[in-house]
Amino acid sequence: MERSKQTRFAEDDFSVETMPPEKGKIIDYVSGNLVEDKPEERVRQVFERKLVEEYKYSKEQIQTVPEFGIQKGSKKIGPADIVVFRTPQKTFDNIYIIIETKRKERKDGLDQLKSYLSPSPAEFGVWFNGKEIVYLQCLKKQPYFRDIPDIPKKGETLEDVGLYQKKDLLPATELKTVFETCHNYIYANEGLLKERVFNEVLRLIFIKMVDEKDSSQKCEFRITDKELDEIETGKQNAFMDRIKNLFARVKIEYGDVFDKGETINLKPLTIAFVVSQLQKYSLIQTPADVKGTAFQTFVYAHERGERGEFFTPYPILELAVRMLDPNDHETILDPACGSGGFLIQSMKYVWEKIEEGRPDLRDADRKDLKIKYARIYLKGIDINPDLARVAKMHMILYDDGHTGLFSANSLEPFDKINSIALQTGAGSVNPESTKKVMTNPPFGERGEVTDKTVLIQFNLGYKWKKDRQTGKWFKSNDLRDGQTPEILFIERCLQFLEDKGKMAIVLPDTILTSSTHEYVQEFIKSNARVLAIVSLPPVTFVPHGAGSKASLLFLQKMAKDEIQSLGDYRLFRVVCEKIGYDKRGRTVFERDDLGNLVLDQEGRPVVNTDIHEIIEAYHKFRVRS
């Protein structure tokens, strides 16, 4: 069991390079010194890493801890959070950039930054709070400071910013704060509703991706300091023409995601800011997990604020995928796919199998096999068109697999679902057409499904009665007035499965344990073999906007006579006690008896979770049973 590869979650909003065995401390990225683990400190660590890994300044020419004191004449006016020097010589007259960092939600500090810049020879300044950012150039006369699109990388000048070739682009070290910064700038400067802001950010992300995939060496997705100055003074330049042309190509290349009539509804200055934040990165070269984590965080924050939607936490995705163990010839369907978490985790899992299992193939052929699998074997449906669209975008960030996703009500009649699937180019979706189903359906807190045309399709849409003599439940001929969606999803998932197909579904515990739902339990046992039940900790969905105590149910579809022939078979039942995070979503790490952090082989803290032990135990159980 490779725990070092499977037990790393981000802690709070910012992850750190390593964790020392001292509670309440983290290691400063540049200096290596221990610092207090505070929100503002984590913001500083994010920018320290960017300076070294993205801007290419050496640690030797940066001072963080202890902080460099700024002088104004004979008076000390304060220590600066981060100072970048022109060379490793850390003297006052050698200061090049000063950075002031604040914790999230703090808006102050810009005047403080300017007070540090004024008496110094610094050419540039940055103010950053993890959600918003300001870049400044220092001038020798009024107005003394001016906004710029970005600070130069090491060895570059301000005039070089934005004049990028594709070969100059670098993978991002993290994108969560970048996406959030873009979102917050639009929200603050455009007066749009959050949903519209969200869609504008997504459009610009895809414009960036299309530009990167173009064969020309010159970047079109860019903004120079000169162009930004022209926009601010109302002068015409080629910037907006480039962006509009790129978006026209986006709508052609991703016609199943964007409508032909869509436009970018932002001011040129706002678009310029977003471009300035993304232009130096290569989204193609950025690791898929970095892109996926940023996108999922960005989507979740938006959906939680607008509609209260919640997404399946990563440990549950991993649990379902690794226990079902999909292969590259098996169709996988999520009929309530949300932002695509189960499908993406399945795709990554199968891709790992292809990488490890086909060493005989050339790299290009192996990549083709992975893309073919993603396009043909992954299917996703969501009733919310916005979420279905988000899931498509999420898959595209992982390179592909979006073509099998579409928006429909998975509880509608099959002919209607299949018609929509074919119209959208997702391919046919029919009963008994998939090998694996994984889903986290909407729970019924918001009401029941009452549409008779929907209920009539399901055995569980009817009233059930208990035979007093046998104690067995049987379906009556009376249709129910309503049924909760998660109960209908159990039956719908079984309908989607081919014979011997397997499924994993998140369900409220009450469905599996309460006497009120005995008829549902009877239906399940009569139509499938129960492979496993994993009871999830109460905290599992709390950080994600829901408080229902839930379990993950694993079933295998079988004919009634086959189930009867099994007799009293054994099933795998376990209680997951440690999910790896607390009720606020903060990662919880393992500690020894003395309270010290337990570290893996690479010196990183081990997440306190038993998810991987459960997966391992289940596969051993399957071998024995």
Image (cartoon, rainbow, N blue to C red):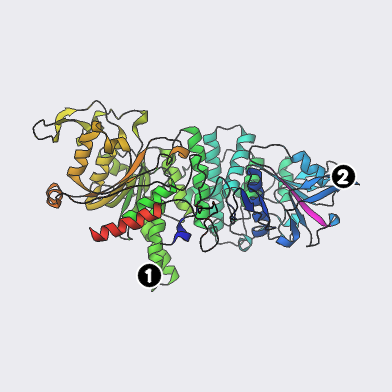
Q: In 3D space, how far apart are the residues under numbered discs 2 and 1 (Cα atoms)?
A: 64 Å
Q: Is residue 363 left or right of residue 597?
A: left
Q: Inspect the image, locate mark 2, and give the three-letter code of the amino acid beneath it.
A: Lys
Q: Is residue 526 left or right of residue 211?
A: left
Which range of residues does the magenta coloring cover? 94-104
Q: Is residue 137 left or right of residue 301?
A: right
Question: Does residue 103 belong to the magenta stretch?
Answer: yes
Find disc 2 in the rendering and name its residue. 141
CB under 8 Å between discs 2 and 1? no
Name the N-terminal-most of marks 2 and 1. Answer: 2
Question: Does residue 461 belong to the magenta stretch?
Answer: no
In the image, residue 254 above or below residue 1: above
Q: Residue at x 68, y 42 (%)?
A: 102
In the rendered image, the quadrant that contains the N terminus is bottom left
Find disc 1 in the rendering and name its residue. 358
Does the rendering let one see residue 534? Answer: yes
Quarter holding residue 494: top left
Judge the density around disc 2: few (<14), some (14-19), many (≥20) Cα neighbours within 10 Å: few
Mark 1 element type: loop
Residue 623's tag is none
Q: Inspect the image, locate mark 1, and give the three-letter code of the amino acid beneath it.
A: Arg
Residue 208 picture location, percent across and down: 56, 52
Judge the density around disc 1: few (<14), some (14-19), many (≥20) Cα neighbours within 10 Å: few
Q: Residue at x 41, y 64 (%)?
A: 368
Q: Is residue 409 left or right of residue 70?
A: left
In the rendered image, the quadrant that contains the C terminus is bottom left
In the image, residue 173 above or below residue 447: below
Residue 298 picture location, percent across and down: 52, 43
Q: Which residue is nearer to you in this view: 62 or 258?
A: 62
